Amino acid sequence: MSELGPSAVAAQDVQISVDEARAHIAQALVPVEGSQQVSLDQALGRVLADDLLSPINVPAHDNSAMDGYAFCGADLLANRDTVLRALGSTVYAGQPFAGTLAQGECIRIMTGAVMPPGLDTVVPLELCQVADAQVTIGAGVVRAGDNRRLAGEDLTAGRPALRAGRILRPADVGLMASLGYTQAWVKRRLRVALFSTGNELVEPGQPLPPGGIYDSNRFSLMAALQRLHVEVLDFGLVPDDRHALAAAMTRAVSQADVVLTSGGVSAGDADYTREVMEQLGAVSFWKVAMRPGRPFAFGALRALGHAGSASPGGSAPAQRTAWLFALPGNPVAALVTFYALARDGLLRLAGAQSEPIATLRVRSVQTIRKRPGRTEFQRGRVEPGSDGQWCVHLVGSQGAGILRSMSEANALVVLHHDQKSVEAGDWVDVWLFDGLV
Ligand code: AMP
Ligand code: MG
């Protein structure tokens, strides 16, 4: 495919860096409205809609952090052993001690048990000697206040325990339960209409005609979207035909917040794609200075409410808009542009607090050639080296269409816009696939 398409196409294409593309997308998008209540067992990965206030102090009472003996720290003697008289009973978690202790007394206590009134210190069992109801604590073994958790030390009643926009992780779900909540208010799921374009594409499961290839992008992208906990509307395959494309776009906009496509944005197809986009909205076609994945289109699409889910009751059709992310067709380019350009935008639309993709620095075991002036994403495996230090090596062929090496990889090596070639032993940035979305 020629780099120089028809002059009109070349003239309109804007060459921008990955950072510029990301900044433009972030600045254009506004989070969707709407929230819903879900039970905690459905809350994982959802976006918290409002700040979640703690209704209680956690812990609710001062309690012991150890199995040991509780006493009053003022009874500790300086520079010599302290000998305390142990009461006969034990304080267990969930069974507060009703009595009071006199000066010089202590009581056996288990982890999590409420500190009896007036006591503020616990000596762990393994740090004291017990004989004939006498507990001996060596000089300097504990200080007053040790091994006691204070009421409200984790969370204070009335203060936010989790902030709006939080993507709920296992610990967050547990935290909500620890506050007594059974439900969470979360943002409604983002609806993403997904389709693949290309006359050569065949649905997996069907016979493969000469020249045909199975549509893989829809499935890799669907899987990547599932990790973002969005609702995926599968619009299937769309041929390279302006009417078919316009119809699919219109239907997608009427039902979804986002239209995610692959294929049809590189020079050979861009003409009619662009024509359709111009009818439907304001879309920018970018040549993003990155490899793989150069062609990319982003913008807002309009569709009148009559085209599909019309508003019930005969009211005036609402004009819906949806955001288009049009990814290149090459299978690796489609996934890399999804991670590098679409992922953050989708999270922002979903109402999530922006969390940059976690970037780790590891040593490259090999030389990697790199030209300054574009961001390059190379498929690699991050593994512990023979010296125990984590390092990365490239896997397989790096061609934009070779999905197998993407599948063998567990990370992308991110070679930044201005970065030059990497020598063996140099530090490089990587994005691990797991944890990425
Ligand atoms: P395009 O961006 O439409 O020019 O496509 C670039 C390359 O990616 C071509 O070789 C296509 O056959 C291939 N391709 C496009 N879409 C898909 C898809 N959904 N699944 C697998 N390969 C694709
Ligand atoms: Mg194509």
Image (spheres, grey):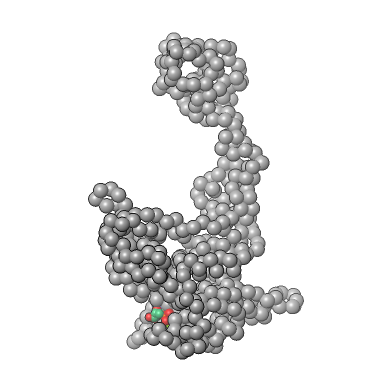
Residue depicted at x 74% and y 78%: 316
Residue depicted at x 44% and y 81%: 266
**Residue found at the very far left of the displayed protein:** 386
**Ligand 1: which quarter?**
bottom left
Left or right: 23 as drawn, with respect to 209? right
The image quadrant of residue 410 is: bottom left
Q: Is residue 42 visible?
A: no
Does 116 sit above or below residue 383? above
Does 11 sit above or below residue 89? below
Figure disc tally: 0
**Quadrant in which the N terminus is drawn:** bottom left
Camera-side residue of 3 and 87: 3
**Residue found at the very far bottom of the displayed protein:** 6
Residue depicted at x 66% and y 80%: 304
Camera-side residue of 221 and 385: 385
Camera-side residue of 149 and 201: 149
Residue depicted at x 38% and y 66%: 377
The image quadrant of residue 3 is: bottom left
Left or right: 199 as drawn, with respect to 144? left
Does 76 sit above or below residue 346? above
Q: Position of residue 25 (x, y in %)?
A: 55, 68
Camera-side residue of 183 and 377: 377
Q: Position of residue 368 (x, y in %)?
A: 30, 65
Q: Is residue 437 visible?
A: yes
Does 347 sit above or below residue 135? below
Q: Position of residue 41 (x, y in %)?
A: 54, 52
Q: Position of residue 200 (x, y in %)?
A: 40, 84
